[in-house]
Image (tube, rainbow, N blue to C red):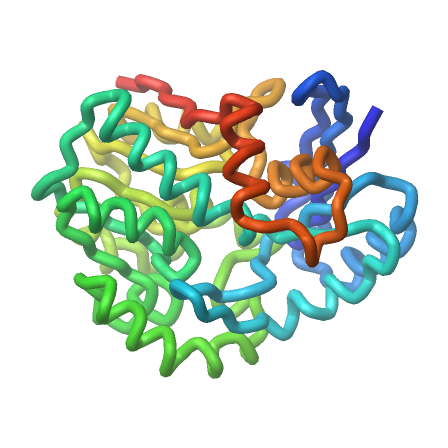
Amino acid sequence: MKHVVSVSIGSSKRDHKARAEFLGEEFIIERIGTDGDIDKAISLIKELDGKVDAFGMGGTDLYLTTGSRRYLIRDAAKILKAAQKTPMVDGGGLKNILEYRAVKYLAREKGMDFRGKRVLITAAVDRYGMALAFDEEGARLVMADLVFALKIPLPFRTMRQLRIAASILAPIIVRLPFKMLYPTGSEQEKTDSESSKLWKYYQEADIIGGDFLFIRRHMPPSLPGRIIVTNTVTAADIEFLRQRGIRTLVTTTPELEGRSFGTNVMEAVMVALLQKPLAEIKRQDYEDLIDRMGLVPRIVELN
């Protein structure tokens, strides 16, 4: 029995524990939130270090990645250092692969035509693979990284704009406290009081992609007929989307006993299966495991 634990600086209300089987191996998978307390997360990791097979780092990313370049997030590096024996991953090694493949799967296997469709991505630096795939499929991108994170009304509309802006801003952003960029702890349960200023970005979109908590935080009361492409949703989140009129939910990770876990969890599962040092794990290792595990997007018709 393998044991994977995602230690998240997110809300403990979203904690979950499940059993699953992958490639003949049984797993216990846990998500433990520390309500925004980084010191508590570090303490928990030190307590479990060497006692579990792999850690996921939840509620934050270790790097901001744009294409071949990546920038270390200072707050996340503190958490990573706490794991001395057990490998820890943030999902970044898998996220871009899985989300790129998810969009291609929807186009090739499910016949979804994205040409000319208006696709809002709440933070494309965090969803680079998703943005790239939609761009290749001919979608009209609106990448709202500055809009949602920094309240600067300047969306990017091409991948080139995103890469140029990221190369300039990322070295500065990664030094900021993470809570300035992304909701942590109880903030994950709230909606932004100024969200109405941002509703137009949702209302003009056919498809909305990105981190679920970011999407939920600013979502208008009604969005009939839209498609959401995301991950890490609970049963309550699905009901929330149904009430908003969302037509279709696509999650890039599978459902495990009532919820889909984040890519940090699925990457940790893969690390536990591979049993190789992190430095030796290559992109192709993940590609091969995705195929062997039969991972495809979950599609839920809501309305």
Q: Is residue 144 left or right of residue 263?
A: left
Is 66 placed above or below 224 here?
below
Rendered residue at 29%/52% (across/down): 132
45 to 112, vertically: above or below: below
Q: Position of residue 281 (x, y in %)?
A: 65, 50
Q: x%, y% of residue 83?
A: 82, 58
Whether residue 101 sits left or right of residue 292 in the image: it is: left
Q: Which of the image's four quarters has the N terminus?
A: top right
Please state the horizontal and vertical placement of residue 250, each as a whole percent of the image: 36, 29
- The structure residue drawn at horizontal position 63% and vertical position 46%, both measured from the top left corner, is 11
Q: Which residue is rendered at x = 49% and y = 26% of the image? A: 295
User: What x and y, as percent, mark residue 66?
Assistant: 40, 65
- Quarter-of-image position of residue 271: top right
Looking at the picture, does residue 241 appear above or below residue 44? above
Q: Quadrant of residue 247?
A: top left
Asked whether residue 88 is in view, the answer is yes
- Residue for point 65% across, 37% down: 270
**Residue 198 or 7: which is nearer the viewer?**
7
